[in-house]
Image: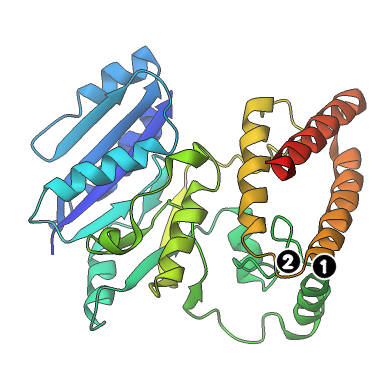
Amino acid sequence: MKTICIIPTHRNRYNFLKKTIGVIEKSKNIYKIIIINNGSTIESTSKINKLKSQKIKIINFKINIGSNAHIHGIKMALKFKSNKFIWLLDDDNLPNKNTLNFLIRKFSKFKNTNHAFTPIRYNLNQYKKYLLGKHNFNYYNNNFIKFNTIKYFVDKIKFIFFSNKRAIEDKIVQMAPFGGLFFHRDMISLVGLPSHKFFVYADDLYFTLGMTKKNIKIHLLKKYLVKDQEINEKNHYFSKKISDHDVFYQVRNLTYLSTLFIKNNLIFNINKNIFLFLFFIKGFFISQIKLFFFYRFKIILLYLLYCFKK
């Protein structure tokens, strides 16, 4: 069954991209690979353009267009009428060489197309926590950026008494990242394209939440494993490696997602204030430059104030 793989890339990440393509392009089920060059460096762009072939299509943008990269990729994929599946990968995602065949066989077991698959990206911290029973992928009612006071303590108790009691099974999740997302092309007619309004951060969560609302089941598969070549999880809100620009989109977009689950304003505000208190304490201790910490925390509060005024 023919599949189109969409891979956005940016900055100077050609070496990651080349390894990813090297794994997937040999699969007999890959019809096209669409590379979205999202404002890469001149040197990287030159190398990317040399990858162009009958199977590999390239869309070049001089600047980083954020979420629009996936929009352009999906639009191009839909023009090829003969393909059935769309596979989204980050430029540093390394699936196993037989992964695509496994996904197609898995999909064929279902009677309709209302299913999507997301991988366990096993070397990322959030997935390591999930495998230990410490992490889930759901937003709960009245959460603030996934934090819900009652659920927080319930999960802690569950981990103490019930973690590692059984093997991790396939799970239906509420939302998922773009990296590794696999679905039938017909799903776009139900859910629509990703929203360009998010620009960066949480655009994938909002898109896949739209799947869940349309009764499309997103399966987190224990045997669908992807390795990330680059790990950036240490770049927290109080790191100088993340710009104020990036922090703004994280705060704005994740806050907006939280507001979609408000059922009780009082409980939501309690969760928000407890989250910010814990966030402050944790951030203070992990920040090496305290002056920068206070500056960044002030910026975050101003962004939050902006979010709730809109």
SS type, badge 1: helix
Residue 224 x, y percent position in the rendering = 40, 66
For the residue marked with disc 2, what is the amino acid?
Asn
Give the residue furthest to the top. Answer: 42
For the residue marked with disc 1, what is the amino acid?
Ile
Q: CA distance from mark 2 to mark 1?
A: 6 Å
Left or right: where 301 falls relative to 173:
right
Left or right: where 229 falls relative to 306:
left
Q: How is the image coloured?
A: rainbow
Left or right: where 303 falls relative to 115:
right
Neighbor class of circle 1 (other Cα within 10 Å; few <14, some 14-19, many 20+) is some
Residue 119 x, y percent position in the rendering = 44, 62
Q: Quadrant of residue 252?
A: top right
Above or below, 170 relative to 152:
below
Q: Split into 4 quadrants, where in the image is the N terminus? A: bottom left
Neighbor class of circle 2 (other Cα within 10 Å; few <14, some 14-19, many 20+) is many
Q: Nearer the viewer, residue 206 or 170?
A: 206
Residue topped by disc 2: 142
Residue 305 x, y percent position in the rendering = 78, 39
Task: Decide if residue 243 is in sight here.
Answer: no
Q: Quadrant of residue 133?
A: bottom right
SS type, badge 2: loop
**Residue at 23%, 40% in the rendered image:** 34
Above or below, 70 relative to 220:
above
Residue topped by disc 1: 267
**Residue at 92%, 46% in the rendered image:** 281
Res 210 label? none
Q: Are marks 2 and 1 in contact (CB under 8 Å)?
A: yes
